[in-house]
Amino acid sequence: MNIEAISGLLENGEVNEAMSGYAQILTNGSDEEKFLLAEELFRFGFLEETKNLLESLLLNYPTEGELLVLLAETELELGEEEKATLILEKVGENDPQYPQALLLMADLYQMNGLFEVSEQKLLRAKQLLPNESIIDFALGELYAHQGRFTDAIQYYERVAHERNEVGGVSLNQRLAEAYSAGGSFEEALLYYEKALGERLEINTLFGYAFTALQAGKNKTAIDKFEELKVLDPEYHSLYLHLSHAYEHEEMLEEAYETIKQGIKQDDFNKDLFFYGGKIALKLDLVEEAESLLREALALDPGFTEGALVLNKLLLKLERYEDVLDLISNTDMKDEEEPQLLWDAAVASQHLEQYSQALNKYQHAYTFFKDNKEFLSDYGYFLIEEGKIAEAAEILTILIKIDPMNEE
C-alpha cells in the first residue's frame, strides 16, 4: 500500500485499514516511504506511529536534522518537552534545519518562562537567516509577551512589509494590540480598522472597542461593543466595558441595562454586580443598589471595595447595626482595610456603644492621623464623651493640617 492510499483511508476515517498499511511500511518500506508517511501521520495526529517511523529512520541517519526536528515536534505534541529539547540539541549548527531547531527551542524556553534564553536562540537564528520573516514574527511575539511593546512593534512592522498574516495570525491585529498595550491608542485604532477590514473577528472587534474606550472615544466604543454583542451575546467581557462607555457619556439608564444583560450572561462575575450597584446608586435606586452590592460580596466575602461602598450606603441610610453586621461577616481584617475600623467606630457611636466606638477610633487613628475628616469625627466624639484633653489634642492636629477650618 502506498502513501497516497494510506492518506486517502485516513481522510475517509478508515483507520484500521490505514494502520495496516502503516505496519507494512514500518516493517518493509523504504526510507523515503517511511519519512513521507511520518509527515502524513503527523499531519493527521497519529503521533506514536509518527515517532516509531522517525526513530526507525534515525537508526540509520542519527544526525539528520529534518528527522530530528520532526521528532522533536512530535514529542512536543505528546507533551514531552524535555525529550524535545534533548532531541533539538542534537541538530548540528551546519545542518540546514538548525534555524528551525533554534525556533523550536525558543518556543520551548518561552513556554517555561526562560525569556532571555529564548531571545538568544531567536537572535542566533536571525543571524543565520537575516531576512526570514518567521523569525521576525517570533521575536515580535516574544517581546509582546514580555511587555516590550516598542521592540515587538519594530519586528511586527518588518513582517507586515512582506505579508499580512503568519500562520493565520493578522499582522495588523498584532500591531494594533501592541500599540494599544503600549498606550498608543490612536495608532492602535488605525491598525484595528485595517485588521477588521481584512476579516471580521470577535476578539479583534473587542480589542478595537476597548482601545476606543481607553482613548476616550466613548461613542465609537459603544458602537463596536454593541456590534460585538449582536455577533456574540455570550462574549462576557464586553458588558462591563460597554457599561463604562455609557456612563462616560452620562447615559446611566443604558449603562444599568447593560449591566443587567451582562449578569444574565455571567452571574458569577462580582465586578458586574459591584458596578451595577454603583450605577444604581447614581440612579437613586437604593434597594437595587444594596441588593447588587450584597450579591457581589456573596460571591467574594473578601471583596474590599464592595464592602466599603455598601458600608457607605448603609451609613448614609443610618442603618448602623447593618454596618456592624456587614463588617463582622466579611473576610477582611481591620489591618488590611482600616476604613472598616472607622466605619465601625461611627456606627458604634450612633448605637451608643461608646466603649466599642472609642476602641475603634483609637485603633483607626494609627491609619488616619493625617485625615481631616477622620480627625474631625474622632475629635467631636471625644468631646461628646467628655474627654476634653484628648479632644483638644486631636483638634490641635486637625488645625495644623487644615488651618482654615473655622468650625
Image (cartoon, rainbow, N blue to C red):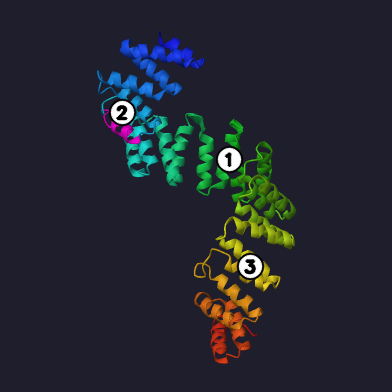
Q: Nearer the viewer, residue 33 or 109?
A: 33
User: Under tag 3, what secondary structure?
Assistant: helix
Task: Please determine whether, in this image, residue 321 is positioned above or below residue 223.
Answer: below
Asked if residue 258 is among those painted magenta in the image, a careful observer would answer: no
Which residue is depicted at the point 46% across and 33% down?
Answer: 159
Amino acid found under the numbered disc labelled 2: Tyr
Q: Is residue 276 visible?
A: yes
Where 359 sits versus 176, above or below?
below
Within the magenta stretch, is there residue 84?
yes
How far separated are the C-alphas under marks 3 and 2? 64 Å
Q: CA distance from mark 3 to mark 1?
A: 44 Å
The amino acid type, in three-letter code, at marker 3 is Asn
Q: Secondary structure at mark 2?
A: helix
Residue 311 is marked as: 3
Residue beneath disc 1: 190
Q: Quadrant of the N terminus?
A: top left
Question: Tag 2 or tag 3, which sits nearer the N-term?
Answer: 2
Q: Quadrant of residue 80?
A: top left
Q: Residues within 10 Å of mark 3 (few under 14, many from 20)?
A: many
Which of discs 3 and 1 lies nearer the camera? The answer is 3
- Identify the magenta region: 81-91
Q: Nearer the viewer, residue 179 or 322?
A: 322
The image's mark for residue 98 is: 2
Where does the image place residue 301, in percent across and percent down from the top left? Answer: 57, 60
Q: Residue at x 57, y 80 (%)?
A: 356
Secondary structure mostly seen in magenta is helix
Mark nearer the N terminus (2 vs 1): 2
- Residue projecting furthest to the top: 1
